[in-house]
């Protein structure tokens, strides 16, 4: 695992250098869904500081009762009936895909007497099976969420299209970058709005070229996904 992480970081550094960027400006979220805690702890030993999970229940089973020296990101679809558990478990909720969910999170963080970090998921590929805001609505949604008192909107997230067509992937990431820049320009006083989360194991190099500040990789670090029964 340590070797895998080091080799991946070398490849990421090369990808960043090719487009005039620094690896230090790109946060790696190690996607640890289906992976045992032992793998997570080994990756943390290798320097990974952020981990992503898709399911609240799996995260609870895996991390309950342990002291963590890394941040935990919710990157899968979050059901409203799991919000309270997610608020208790995760440091960042990247997959906010509706204004209603943002409102529920705001109320739940208020109940917990703290402010929570969230990101907006945008469906830039237009694929009907995916969750996320439509690109044309996300700017207005961000305006609304910035007025909420118990969530901090720190960025945007998207999942690139499942295709070998590099142009389609690049278009998807480029659109998210444009939306990110527009929101950032409209709210230049919001320094916390700084995360552009896009790119996974198969397309992170394109994402880096298109300006990603955060990538979410699992297979590139851990190998083939473990199938859950």
Image: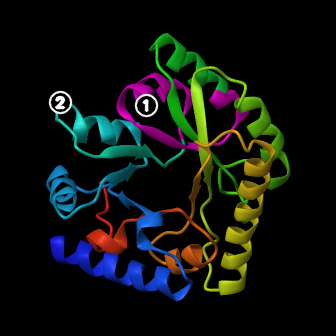
Instruction: Please tell me whether residue 6 belongs to the stretch shown in magenta.
Output: no
Q: Is residue 181 visible?
A: yes
Judge whether 66 appears above or below 171 on screen.
Answer: above
Q: Which residue is mark 1?
A: 86
Residue 19: image quadrant is: bottom right
> Regarding mark 2 in the picture, which secondary structure is present there?
loop
Left or right: where 222 falls relative to 129: left
**Residue at 16%, 35% in the rendered image:** 66
Q: Label 2 crowding class (10 Å Cα cut-off): few <14, some 14-19, many 20+?
A: few
Left or right: where 35 falls relative to 65: right
Q: Label 1 crowding class (10 Å Cα cut-off): few <14, some 14-19, many 20+?
A: many
Left or right: where 195 falls relative to 228: right
Query: Which of these two is toward me, 133 or 152?
Result: 152
Residue furthest to the front in view is 189
> Regarding mark 1 in the picture, which secondary structure is present there?
helix
**Residue at 27%, 69% in the rendered image:** 222
Left or right: where 100 falls relative to 140: left
Tell whether label 1 touches label 2 (CB within 8 Å): no
From the top left corner, tell me how far across and down residue 14 is, in percent. Answer: 42, 86
Query: Which of these two is toward me, 202 or 67?
Result: 67
Query: Which of these two is toward me, 77 or 229?
Result: 77
Q: Earlier in the sequence, mark 2 or mark 1?
A: 2
Residue 105: image quadrant is: top right
**Residue at 46%, 74% in the rendered image:** 22
Region of the chain picked out in magenta, as a range: 78-102
Quadrant where the image shows the N terminus = bottom left
Q: Which residue is mark 2?
A: 65
From the top left corner, tell me how far across and down residue 39 is, in percent. Answer: 18, 59
Q: Is residue 1 visible?
A: no
């Amino acid at each position: 695992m340590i070797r895998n992480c080091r080799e991946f970081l070398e490849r990421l550094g090369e990808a960043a250098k090719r487009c005039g960027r620094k690896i230090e400006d790109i946060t790696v979220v190690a996607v640890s869904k289906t992976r045992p805690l032992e793998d997570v702890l080994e990756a943390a030993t290798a320097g990974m500081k952020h981990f992503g999970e898709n399911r609240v229940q799996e995260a609870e089973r895996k991390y309950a009762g342990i002291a963590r020296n890394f941040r935990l990101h919710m990157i899968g679809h979050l059901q409203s009936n799991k919000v309270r558990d997610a608020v208790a478990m995760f440091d960042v909720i990247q997959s906010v895909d509706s204004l209603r969910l943002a409102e529920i999170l705001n109320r739940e963080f208020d109940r917990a007497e703290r402010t929570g970090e969230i990101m907006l998921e945008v469906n830039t590929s237009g694929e009907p099976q995916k969750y996320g805001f439509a690109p044309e609505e996300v700017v207005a949604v961000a305006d609304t969420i910035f007025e909420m008192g118990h969530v901090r909107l720190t960025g945007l997230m998207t999942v690139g299209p499942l295709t070998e067509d590099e142009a389609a992937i690049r278009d998807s990431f480029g659109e998210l970058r444009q939306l990110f820049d527009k929101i950032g320009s409209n709210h230049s006083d919001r320094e916390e709005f700084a995360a552009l989360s896009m790119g996974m194991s198969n397309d992170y190099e394109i994402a880096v070229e298109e300006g990603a500040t955060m990538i979410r990789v699992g297979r590139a670090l851990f190998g083939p996904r473990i199938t859950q029964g």
